Amino acid sequence: MTDYSVAASHFDAIWLHYAQMSRLLERAVQKAIIVGASSGIGWELAIQLADAGYQLGLMARREDRLHELAEKLPGTHWVQYADVTMCEDSQQHLQDLIERMNGVDMVVLNSGVGILEGRLEWDNQRTMIDVNVRGFCALAVVAMQHFENVGTGHLVGISSLAAHVSGASMPTYHASKAFVTSYLNGLRGRVERRKAPITITVVEPGFVRTPMVLGSPPWMASVDRAVQQMMTAIVRKKAHVFITRRWRLVAWMAYLMPTTWLAKRF
Ligand SMILES: NC(=O)c1ccc[n+]([C@@H]2O[C@H](COP(=O)([O-])OP(=O)(O)OC[C@H]3O[C@@H](n4cnc5c(N)ncnc54)[C@H](OP(=O)(O)O)[C@@H]3O)[C@@H](O)[C@H]2O)c1
């Protein structure tokens, strides 16, 4: 005669084992959200993170571009519309995406705009402040709250070498990136003070060949090479990286030079 209770307890044990294994496997897969994944650095970062096995949440305004990207990446990915200038809406969009992904290990805040200021116009200044400062902060708060709730995480913010020099051509852009670098350094101080295992990485590119850059400025890196260097910094959980590395010399020299003399040249 068959002992159904023994068979059932075997089944329970196998099921429990299977459930534990799938939870462990799910935890082993790294999940990241890239805000501003529809172009340039964010687009290439998605490609390199997906190749490294990450599951990605892709955010930006151009959803068609995000779907096109998601379809060409290996693995499972999510797309979420967001206009970061609509701060509260985009906070909700990020929260929704984190829920849909069942949590996230890393958030990359990459959305940014740089507009030449030959004529000083408030509309352009406001756009740069809305995207690079207000939108950045709004989403950083949501990411940090998630990481603090789950007890761990990695926030990557794309600032710029422009954070270290004032610039006559785009005064607002330079100032906005100084804000980003300073804000992220402050957040790192906060997590270290609380001994929270959260990593904050500040990425400061010089010139990278993307639709944002006009002409051919010096030391322009290909987006592929720039993102390779970012990937290394991300994997090593670095606090800070210049992209490419030689720009650290410029940043260092910038502090030795007269501010206005330098600003006239940027
Ligand atoms: N390229 C460089 O030389 C360089 C140097 C230093 C720093 N950076 C920084 O690197 C980051 C990426 O720039 P990139 O060169 O890759 O430029 P890009 O190709 O123009 O990409 C900009 C990204 O920002 C997103 N974005 C812009 N406005 C947005 C908004 N209102 N809401 C949501 N997303 C928005 C865009 O998506 P949608 O338009 O689809 O919304 C796009 O995905 C920026 O923060 C930039 O300041 C670039």
Image (tube, rainbow, N blue to C red):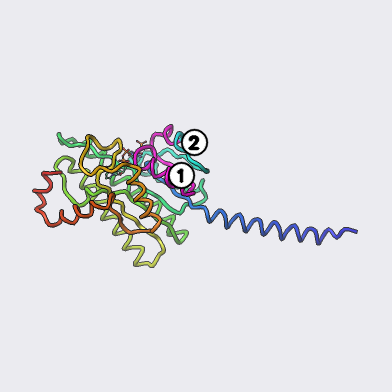
Identified at 20% across, 52% down, the residue is: 164
| Percent x, y of residue 171 | 17, 43
Q: Quadrant of the N terminus?
A: bottom right
Is-magenta flag for residue 58?
A: yes
2 or 1: tag closer to the N-terminus: 1
Q: Of helix, strand and loop, which one carries label 1?
A: strand
User: On residue 240, which mark appears?
Assistant: none
The amino acid pointed to by label 2 is Glu
Part of the protein shown in magenta: 37-66
Identified at 28% across, 49% down, the residue is: 244
Q: Relative to residue 193, is residue 49 drawn left or right?
A: right
Q: Quadrant of residue 200?
A: bottom left
Q: Quadrant of the C terminus?
A: top left
* In the depicted structure, whether residue 212 falls above or below residue 8: above
Q: Which residue is mark 1?
A: 57
Q: Of helix, strand and loop, which one carries label 2?
A: helix
Q: Quadrant of residue 238?
A: bottom left
* In the depicted structure, whether residue 204 falls above or below residue 216: below
| Percent x, y of residue 217 | 20, 40
Q: Which is closer to the viewer, label 2 or label 1?
A: 2
Seen as rendered, the residue at the extreme top is 64
User: Label 1 neighbourhood size at 10 Å, few (<14), some (14-19), many (20+)?
Assistant: many
Identified at 45% across, 33% down, the residue is: 68
User: On residue 71, which mark appears?
Assistant: 2
Is-magenta flag for residue 56?
A: yes
User: Label 2 neighbourhood size at 10 Å, few (<14), some (14-19), many (20+)?
Assistant: few
Q: CA distance from mark 2 to mark 1?
A: 13 Å
The answer to whether residue 123 is seen in the rendering is no
Residue sitting nearer the eye, 253 or 263? 253
Say whether marks 2 and 1 touch (CB < 8 Å). Answer: no
The amino acid pointed to by label 1 is Gly
